[in-house]
Amino acid sequence: MSQTADEKARSETPEHDREIGHDEFDPIGTLTLIGIYFLILVFLWFFMYFVEFLGNDPTVVGGTLVFAATGERLR
Amino acid sequence: MTNTYIESFPAEAKVVRAAFYSSFLALAIGGLFGIVQTLHRTGYYRFMDSADYYTVLTAHGVLLAITFTIFFLVGVFTWAVTTSLDRPVEDIRFTWVWYGLMVVGTVLTAIPIFAGFTDSEMSASVLFTFYAPLQGHPLFYFGLVLFVVGTWLAGADWFRSWWAWKQEHPDERIPLPTFMVLTTTLMWYIATLGVAAAILLFLLPWSLGLVESVNPLLTRTLFWFFGHPVVYFWLMPAYMMWYIMLPKISGGKLFSDPLARVVFVLFLILSVPTGIHHQYLDPGIAEGFKFIAMTNTMFLLLPSLLTAFTVVASMEHGARQRGGTGYLGWLKALPWRDPVFAGMALAGLMFAAAGFSGMINAGMNINYLVHNTFWVVGHFHLTVGTAVALTFMAVTYWFLPQVTGKELWSRSVALGQVVLWFVGMTFMSNAMHRGGLLGIPRRTAEPQYEGFEFEAAVGSVGELDAQIALGGALLTLSLVLFFANVIGTALNSRSDDLPANEYADTLSGPSDAPLVLDNLKLWTAIAIVLVIFAYSFPLLSIIERGGLFGPELTELPVSIGPGLEYLSTTTVSTVTTAGETAIAIIAGVGS
Amino acid sequence: MRISKGALLVVIAFTAPLIVELRTVLAWVNVELTVLESAVLGIGLIGVLLVWALWPQSQNNATESAETE
Ligand code: HEM
Ligand SMILES: [Cu+2]
C-alpha cells in the first residue's frame, strides 16, 4: 500500500471516465475559484477599513510610527 | 476479500477504533454542554445556576478542543503510519500503553471538572486555557500531564515504526502520510514543552500548595506558547485528510506531493513562534514582541494558501477526470452525494470564511476591536468547530467501515448530517461574529446588563440570540444523526463488500520533491532557533518584572462565594495592578 | 433532474449563508429587511432552485441517471 506513482496509476474510482496526466492538467478552475476568494477578501478588507479606521485615531502600530517619527506619544 | 484496514492490520484496527470511540464519547458529552451553554447565554432556557456556567464551559472546551480532537488524531495518525509504511506497529502492547495513558489522563482530568457540579470541595472550573489566577484541583493538572505524556509516547511509536521501516528501505522517500505524521509530531513535541513547564513548574506545585503564588503573565505566556500550535495539532489531521483522501474521493490525484511536504515543513517551523498573538492585549509584554509575533503569524498565511491551492486543484483534477468542464462547471461533476466528500468540501469552505475572521484576529490593531468578544467564539467554531470537527465526522464515514469491517449504516443520513452541520454553523457563527462586533463578551453566562443595551447595526440583539439558538439546535440535531450512524454501523454485521484501504495517488510524486524536504533534523533545528528568537526576550522580561513565582497572588477557586462582583473585580485588578489591590479587596470582601 | 439529489441538497444549503449575509449587506445600502422578509426571500430562493432543478429538461430524460452522481 505504499504508493509509488506508477504502481497505483490504474486503480481508479468507478465513475472515472478519462485519464488526465500531469501535463494535460490545467487547473484553470482552481485559479478562478481562488481568484473569486481573493476578491472577496480584498473587498472585506476594504470594508473593514470603513468599520475600524475612518474617524479613529491611529492605533498601536500607527502610534509606534508616529512615536518613531516625532518622538511624541499619542494619547 | 476486500482488503480493508481491519483485514490487513486487525490488531491496529482495534486501537484505532478504540481511539475513535473515545473521541466520539467526548464529542457527545461536549456537544451536550454546547447546547446547554447556548440556551443559557441567549436566555432561552436557564435551568442551572449561572455560577455553574463556567463548569459547563470548562467541560465543553476541554472535552471538545482537547479530548475529541486529539483522540481522533492519534487514531488517524496510527492508521496513516501503518498504512503508508505498510507495516504493523512495532509492539502493539506499547501502542495500548499510550492509549491507556491518554484514557487515564482524561478520566483524572474529568473528575475534578465534573465535581464542580457537586457540593464537594473539589473543582476545576478553570476553562480549557487553565491559566492563573484561576486555580483547579491538582488532579486536573495531573490528568493533563498523563494525557500529554500519552501523546508523547504515541509520537515515539510512530517514529519507531519509521526508523524500523528506514532500515529496510534505506533509499526510499518517506511516504507522504508518514511525513505528515512525523512533522506534526515534532511540532507537538516543541509546543508541549510550554504547557509541560507551565503545569509542572508552576500550576501543579501552586495547586498542591508547595509554592505560595505564581506569575500569572508567565503562565499565560507559557500556555499560549502551546495554545497556538495546538491549533495546528487539531488542523494537521484535517489537512492530511484533505491532501490524501479528498483527491481520491473526488476521483482524481493529489496535485503535488512536494507542495504538500513544503506545507507541513512550514507548519513545523512557524507554528510555535506565534503564540504571543493571543496576548495582544496583555499588559506587560512590549509591543515590539507582539509585532514580531504578528509578522510570523502573517507568514503562516503562506502554507494555508498553498493548501487551498493544492487541495482545490486536486478536486478539480478529479472533477475533470469525471467529465467536468468549464471555469466553474466542473464543480457540478464532483461527487456531492458522497457524505465523505460533501462533508470535507463544506468544511473546507467554512475554513475559507474563517480565514477572513482569522486575519482580523491576527492584526494587532484590529484585534483590539474583537478581543475576548463573541467574535472570537464565532471564529473558532468555524475552524476547530467545523473545518476540523466536520472533516473528522465526514471521514468517519470512510473510516468506520475500515476499522469495523461493517458497512456504514446509512449514507443518506450521513449526507443530511454534514449538510445540517454546515447550515447550523452558518447561523450560529454568523450571529456570534456580529455580536462580537457589538462588544458582546465571550465566556459570560448572562451577557445582559442593567442600564445598558448592546446596539445592533442590523436587526436587534434579540434576533442575534435567536439565530444563535437556532444554529445551536441544528448542530445538536446534526450530532444526534452522527451518533445514530456510528451506533447503527457498530450494530451492523460484517460485510465483504467494502472499499479497499487506499489513499490518493499523486500527479507529481515524491521524486519531484527536493531531498532536503525530508531532512527532519534540519527543520526541527530551524524551528527551535525561531522559537528561541521569538520567546527568549519576552520570557526574560516577564520574569525580570514579575519574578518567577510572581508578585503575591491570591488564587481564585471558581466556586463563586461572595458573588460575581467580587470575582470580576479581583480578576481585573489582579491582572492590572497585581498584588496589593487584590489583597485589599479580598481582605475587605472575603472576611 | 438537472443535478444530482446530493448536489441539490448542497446548493440549497448554500442559500443559508447567502440569505443570512444578504440582510447585513443590504442594510449598508439602507434596505432594511425584517427577519420575516428575509425568511420569505430565502424560501422563495429555495423554491426557484427546486423548480430549476426539477423542471424536466425538454428531451432525453432517460439519460438522467447516467449524467448524475
Ligand atoms: C453542538 C455544537 C456546539 C455548540 C452549540 C457550541 C456552543 C458554544 C458556545 C455558545 C460557546 C461560547 C460560550 C461563551 O463564551 O460564553 C462555545 C465555546 C467553545 N466551543 Fe463550542 N459549540 C459546539 C461545538 C463545538 C465543537 C465541535 C468544538 C471543537 C471541536 C467547540 C469548541 C469550543 C471551545 C474551545 C469553546 C471555548 C471555551 C472557552 O471559552 O473556554 N464547540 N461553544
Ligand atoms: Cu493562534
Image (cartoon, coloured by chain):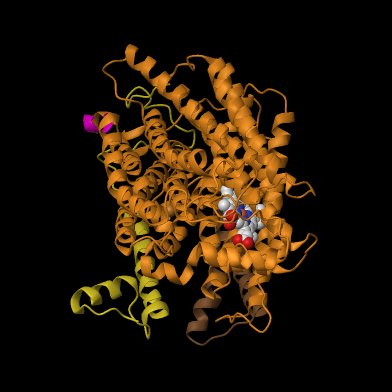
Chain colours: A yellow, B orange, C brown
Left or right of B509? Residue C13 is right
Residue B124, x across and y down, in percent: 66, 47
Left or right of B368? Residue C57 is right
Residue A41, x across and y down, in percent: 37, 66
Residue at 33% from the left image edge and 24% from the top image edge: A4
Q: Is residue C10 magenta?
A: no
| Residue B562 can be seen, yes or no | yes
Residue B478, x across and y down, in percent: 67, 51
Q: Quadrant of residue C51?
A: bottom right
**Start-end of magenta stretch:** B514-519
Q: Quadrant of residue B190?
A: top left
Taking C47 as reference, is B32 above or below it?
Answer: above
Residue at 57% from the left image edge and 40% from the top image edge: B210
Q: Quadrant of residue B360?
A: bottom left
Residue A57, x across and y down, in percent: 35, 82
* Dominant secondary structure (helix, strand or loop) of the stretch shown in magenta: helix
Left or right of C26? Residue A7 is left
| Residue C2 can be seen, yes or no | no
Q: Quadrant of the N terminus of chain C?
A: bottom right
Left or right of B434? Residue A12 is left
Q: Give the farthest residue toward the top.
A: B168
Residue at 27% from the left image edge and 41% from the top image edge: B529
Q: Give the farthest residue toward the left.
A: A69
Q: Nearer the viewer, residue B589 or B404?
A: B589
Number of dots carrying numbers: 0
Q: Quadrant of the C terminus of chain C?
A: top right
Taking C23 as reference, is B333 above or below it?
Answer: above
Taking A31 as reference, is B498 above or below it?
Answer: above
Q: Nearer the viewer, residue B237 or B138?
A: B138
